[in-house]
Image (cartoon, coloured by chain):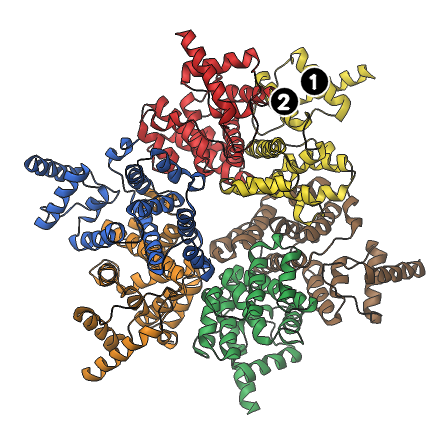
Chain colours: A blue, B orange, C red, D yellow, E green, F brown
Amino acid sequence: MENTTIASASEESELTKQDMPTALDLPMVDPLPPETQKYFDICVEKLGMVPNVLRAYAFDIDKLNAFTSMYNDLMLADSGLSKLEREMIAVVVSSINKCFYCLVAHGAAVRQLSGDPRLGEMLVMNYRVAKLDARQRAMLDFAAKMTTASTTIEEPDRQLLRDAGFSDRDIWDIANVTGFFNMTNRVASATAMVPNPEYHAQFR
Amino acid sequence: MENTTIASASEESELTKQDMPTALDLPMVDPLPPETQKYFDICVEKLGMVPNVLRAYAFDIDKLNAFTSMYNDLMLADSGLSKLEREMIAVVVSSINKCFYCLVAHGAAVRQLSGDPRLGEMLVMNYRVAKLDARQRAMLDFAAKMTTASTTIEEPDRQLLRDAGFSDRDIWDIANVTGFFNMTNRVASATAMVPNPEYHAQFR
Amino acid sequence: MENTTIASASEESELTKQDMPTALDLPMVDPLPPETQKYFDICVEKLGMVPNVLRAYAFDIDKLNAFTSMYNDLMLADSGLSKLEREMIAVVVSSINKCFYCLVAHGAAVRQLSGDPRLGEMLVMNYRVAKLDARQRAMLDFAAKMTTASTTIEEPDRQLLRDAGFSDRDIWDIANVTGFFNMTNRVASATAMVPNPEYHAQFR
Amino acid sequence: MENTTIASASEESELTKQDMPTALDLPMVDPLPPETQKYFDICVEKLGMVPNVLRAYAFDIDKLNAFTSMYNDLMLADSGLSKLEREMIAVVVSSINKCFYCLVAHGAAVRQLSGDPRLGEMLVMNYRVAKLDARQRAMLDFAAKMTTASTTIEEPDRQLLRDAGFSDRDIWDIANVTGFFNMTNRVASATAMVPNPEYHAQFR
Amino acid sequence: MENTTIASASEESELTKQDMPTALDLPMVDPLPPETQKYFDICVEKLGMVPNVLRAYAFDIDKLNAFTSMYNDLMLADSGLSKLEREMIAVVVSSINKCFYCLVAHGAAVRQLSGDPRLGEMLVMNYRVAKLDARQRAMLDFAAKMTTASTTIEEPDRQLLRDAGFSDRDIWDIANVTGFFNMTNRVASATAMVPNPEYHAQFR
Amino acid sequence: MENTTIASASEESELTKQDMPTALDLPMVDPLPPETQKYFDICVEKLGMVPNVLRAYAFDIDKLNAFTSMYNDLMLADSGLSKLEREMIAVVVSSINKCFYCLVAHGAAVRQLSGDPRLGEMLVMNYRVAKLDARQRAMLDFAAKMTTASTTIEEPDRQLLRDAGFSDRDIWDIANVTGFFNMTNRVASATAMVPNPEYHAQFR
């Protein structure tokens, strides 16, 4: 029921004042603008929580909006990559960068979208042990190389993706999802962002 | 004169079809929506060019807008960091990631904003040789550590920034500018993004 | 009931012939010697499975016995380190070495022994985010340094452990548990050892 | 003469109390159990010394026995690898880990078993300069990769060993000898284990 | 006019006493021996300055002479490598070692000898983005590998150079120029050697 | 007797034609100029051999002379560093770079000059295990940092040397000896330079 949801979102919002989602003392705007409050309410309705990354950015609504626009375009908009594939990239990049926040949140997403808890664990721990098809393996190898040695990427690396069936537009998306998590992993680690506890037991 | 400017922007737009700003075959939307065309015209007027990174994203206007919103918020909005300081972070991160596009474009920005061409070169080559005040050195050391070893950042690293005079809000901005260039460096390297040739001789 | 347990252990033993615990074609001795069969039956009784690492070594009973003697002495014998602390070292070392087998098996052990599933996840992903007391943090920092840079360990590193309350005997145990997982991580990764699927959902 | 040997073994045992084989204050059990004393006497008879690694473990006879059982099984039991080949792995792994104890002790063993002092030096310094046959080179390349990047080992790496003539059982032995020295290198470095001085001039 | 040149060289020499070219307090021999003074005068005449590296060595004329003999032989004597190619190696090595002095001085040399300021920037920032012919790319790849991983160079690496058209004598020169800048980069960084300011704006 | 010496030097010179000191086909000038022949004769008289590094450079007498001038100035001329200390730096740098030629030749020199074969081995294997006085340890730590991370050296690193008793002139010498072996290690590894076999058994 919507009323209940709104109520719990408000409690969530109260909680925030005491319980910062990062190590920085940056309280959320209070009250949130109606648009933002509505967005957070939808999160609670759909996910059962407002992800802490959103609460972390909510001290400045322009920053929050810039973040969510980019996030939603990358992870949810039309793409030659499935949503699961984009989450797989997120987890592999976060595994290399050892980002606790992103591994917890996106590890859960891989478990959910794939229905395969073991796959989520493999990508968190060492994606090379997962038995993937050639296309997904090429995608993750490219993401891993971009994360650890982007300066060495050259035309043959892009060609490997084309040979695995990806279009130039797909390569753009792989590059941008990989880039995005190299940003957000670092922001989360640098600010000690804490993942919502709900993720841990989900989809096991 | 504005008329002339608009004309050269149109020529620029023509050029794009043949001369891709990256190694990917992703032509700009043609014609550009009026809002975008206007933004590009302003670029030509102010910078003498449309930066290739914008042309690269312009195959999809939603992606372009998401990118420019985040870029403009990070680099141009109010902050405890000066615009020069944000560009200094951009160059130091790009130097570690050896990103040709970003070193050329943001190296020019440091030369321009500082009026010190030697500073621009130092940040491109090895920021440790620059004689910086303690505040800026702490800021760049944090950015460098976030870039190479974000997983090891803990409270004492943040405290070093506070001791150097930064607020928690400033730390958020340092972390997010650093994160952003860790994204865009990787996207530029992964797609072989080419910097506009105009940058090379500027502000030497 | 013991009869039932023995029966399922036999089925387990049957399964092994088809379903190798590693990528190497090294079938278990068949039939197992009575001592070994008894040990495996106890595993099934207590753990609900025979851990695949034991099945992997069981192609040669001398090797299996040498492995289990060392393992049991290190992980279960009297020590100034609690069993949980020894499992914490196991997970931190395995996280650095990205060993899928050991992270799955010993991650479950940390969740079980600590009763804190989140702690298990933190150690798998990045132990630096866990809020540990000074003693356990010093122990894990030493284990991490031994894993990545053992050649640089000198007297001040050992003194840090003594200052955190560890005896020389405890230091021996920290060093040997850390060493052991640097062995077994590599053996598991080199042979593509597969963890028993039961671990994934345990103690979440 | 056996009597003389026993006498010098006793002197050795006396020495131990003052002259610890590591930086940890962990005196040997005194008197040693008869089985252990006999084993140490055989060492003196055959090697002219009790290797310090054994004296280091002898503060706890269960730990000593677990160590020697595994060591003797790996290095001396039947295997498709010759004893020299197992010592070659020991030295190459120890060279990467820069373990003084193991390089001194096992470097001497390579000089002795090969009759080629220059080979011992090459493996200590840089095994790639040694002119080895394809089989031994493949074996050492696998050991080196397991030591520096075990997480990246996949089926093609194992296939290279099979192509060089190794059986799956041989691969197990290569993996376990390599793993073992990754353990013992770290234990020796972490405890500042000192090699017996006799090794230095042997078999030059 | 020569008289003018000599005069400015003397002023330069005066300057040196106050303005050390490194962080070490090692004044030039005063007066310089006639041979050295003549050499420095020629530098001023041809380059408009005495490069600070020469002023740094001039506290000891034997050391200066040993350095200039080796430098002149490597960079100016007959070779299968053009002078530009030798400067390209200098910049690529210095880029890996992030040596401010050498990047500034030899970056200018590449811009001058190639007439292509963009090439100079590319080699300073990331040589992989430059569109080079196969010969020059092979040369720079070898120099880069020698700089970061000389211990792994083996016959196939040399053969790649031969296949790209280099003679064994050319390989010697590539190896020695690469080696030389691995020396001088480290000396410059270790002593905080400052490049002459004139270089920055040259040949842009 | 000198006559005998000259004779054996000639035989040595004959040998060279067949037995290249590197993997490159670069025969020595034949006959050697009288000055060079005399220098090589002195080597045979004093060292019992012509070091292969000299034979390698002797395809071009100018290059040989440039090399020997710099070598002799660095290693044999007056300095605040003893000859042993300069050889200690040579071995520590060569150990990091895993240069077989230099470890063999300069390891022997450390054994000879120190009269302590064990010290030679320690520096080859891991200098941190050697019990050195604070001065020599600071010297070797600086050399190691210059070798692995010269770009991070700043004033506090130099101050550590001054605090350990070194003058600025001494620091110059430490930096230049360290730089020199970073050059010659790479040249030797890149050309597969083979050390004279005589070194192996010397001064054990």
* Residue C141 percent across, percent down from the top left: 44, 35
Query: Label 1's element?
Result: helix
Classify residue C13 as left or right of residue E160.
left
Residue D68 tag number: 2
How crowded pointer 1 is (Cα within 10 Å; few <14, some 14-19, many 20+) is rated as few
Task: Determine the residue positioned at 86% across, 57% down.
Answer: F45
Sooner in the amino-acid sequence: mark 1 or mark 2:
1
The answer, for residue F130, to whether it is visible in the render is no
The image position of residue B176, as x and y in percent, is 28, 53
Vertical arrangement, residue F133 with respect to residue C11, above or below: below
Label 1 with label 2: CB-CB less than 8 Å: yes
Q: Position of residue E167 (x, y in %)?
A: 68, 68
For residue E50, above or below residue D23: below
Q: Name the residue under label 1.
A: D39
Look at 21% across and 80% down and name the residue there. Answer: B6
- The residues tagged by marks 1 and 2 sit, at their Cα atoms, a distance apart of 10 Å
Q: In the displayed structure, does residue C204 sit left or right of residue F76?
A: left
Q: Tell me the subunit letter for badge 2.
A: D
Label 2 sits on a secondary structure element that is helix
Could one spot residue E111 in this view of the protein?
yes
Give the quadrant of residue F126: top right
Q: Is residue B56 left or right of F163 when viewed as pictured?
A: left
Query: Looking at this view, is B161 or C3 the one in front?
Result: C3
Quarter of the image for residue A51 reads top left
The amino acid marked with disc number 2 is Thr
Please determine whether, in this image, residue F88 is positioned above or below residue F61: above
What is the count of numbered marks? Answer: 2
- Locate the N terminus of chain F and report the quarter of the image it occupies: bottom right
Q: As shown in the figure, which amino acid type bears the numbered disc 1?
A: Tyr
> Which chain is indicated by disc 1?
D
